[in-house]
Amino acid sequence: MSLRSDDVSHPSWLGKPIDARPLFGPESVSLLDLLRGLRREEWSRAAVPGWTVRDLATHILGDYHGRLGRSTESHQRAKGVGETLEAFIHRVNQEWIDLHADHRPTELIEALELAGTQVARQFEGDDLDATGLTVSWAGADPAPKWLDIAREFTEYWTHRQQIRHATGQDTDLEFHALSTVLDTFMRALPHTLRHTAAPAGTQLQMVIVEPPVGTWTVTATADRWSLAEEPRGRPTASVMLDAETAWRLCTRGIDPGTALARARISGARQIAEAACQIVSVVH
């Protein structure tokens, strides 16, 4: 396979479009219900490295405000000279949290309710076929709007799970949201395998079970790995993961070695191991 840079003008290699638009309203309600049920001391618990539950809730509010007020052009102008997208995102996120350090939980909840409703309404009217913001972990710059929107949904969902875990609760396995999140995360597979050379027609299948969410087939073509090709017989390699392991691997809640230890792998192990390097967040 002769690898080349991603062709942003023909993004069919990303697979079939995802419509996450109807999920933002219910996700906002679930977040608000979670936060309203927290005890005072739980707001100070560590949620992710360097951030408490309160910090993470503040970050979600910042994401809402960013979506309500930014465009691709203004987003790019805000970056410093020579600053990478990843560095820019991490810097702006921390600046937002520092700026709102004195917000009380009740104030955050009220602000999240207002902004979350506005964001859900905004996404309802978006055109899935339009051009969206970059999704760097999928190698799409710019990305089709459907992937940009779906990526945004995975951000909110993931942060809610992190708050749940920090406060002693399990992952919310509501199937529609979970399946949409994992479907979106799997769009990173072609980018993940971009440096894995294989003959055209080589196929890897990623199967998510417990619950049975779905199967994704990524195919080596003449110039890239693609999710657009149909499965053809027995795959060259396959990886079976439970849903909990899959979403935590994609968000780096666990490392690839831990995921591999839990996975059921068949076929070409080198390709399967490369697929388990998948990352579906900016990190």
Image (tube, helix red, strand yellow):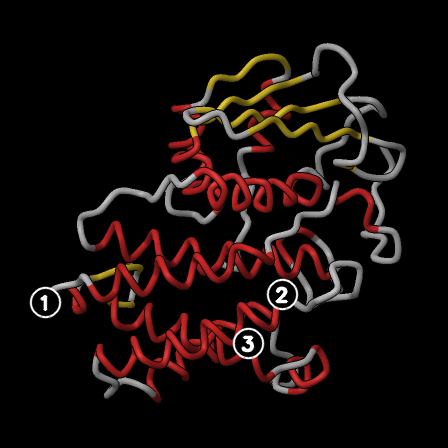
Can you identify the residue that label 2 sits on? 124
User: Which SS class for mark 1?
Assistant: helix
Q: Residue at x 21, y 83 (%)?
A: 104
Q: Based on the displayed image, in which of its 4 quarters is residue 152 positioned?
A: bottom right
Position of residue 180 relative to residue 64, above or below, is above
User: Which SS class for mark 3?
Assistant: helix
Position of the N terminus, as image quadrant, is: top right
Left or right: 154 as drawn, with respect to 72: left
Left or right: 74 as drawn, with respect to 110: right
Position of residue 124 relative to residue 246, above or below, is below
**Residue 156, percent from left and from top:** 45, 60
Q: Residue at x 26, y 83 (%)?
A: 107
Can you identify the residue that label 1 sits on? 41
Q: Distance between the Cα atoms at labels 2 and 1? A: 36 Å
User: In the rendered structure, which amino acid carries the disc numbered 3?
Assistant: Phe
Q: Residue at x 16, y 68 (%)?
A: 44
Labelled pair 3, 1 in contact (Cβ < 8 Å): no
Graded by Cα atoms within 10 Å as few (under 14), some (14 to 19) or many (20 or more), the crowding at tag 1 reads few
**Residue 226, percent from left and from top:** 78, 37
Left or right: 254 as drawn, with respect to 208: left
> Which label's residue is closer to the chain start, 2 or 3?
3
Can you identify the residue that label 3 sits on? 88
Q: Based on the displayed image, in which of its 4 quarters is residue 269 positioned?
A: top right
Position of residue 19 relative to residue 152, above or below, is above
Graded by Cα atoms within 10 Å as few (under 14), some (14 to 19) or many (20 or more), the crowding at tag 3 reads some
Please name whichever residue, 102 or 94, is drawn nearer the observer in this view of the structure.
102
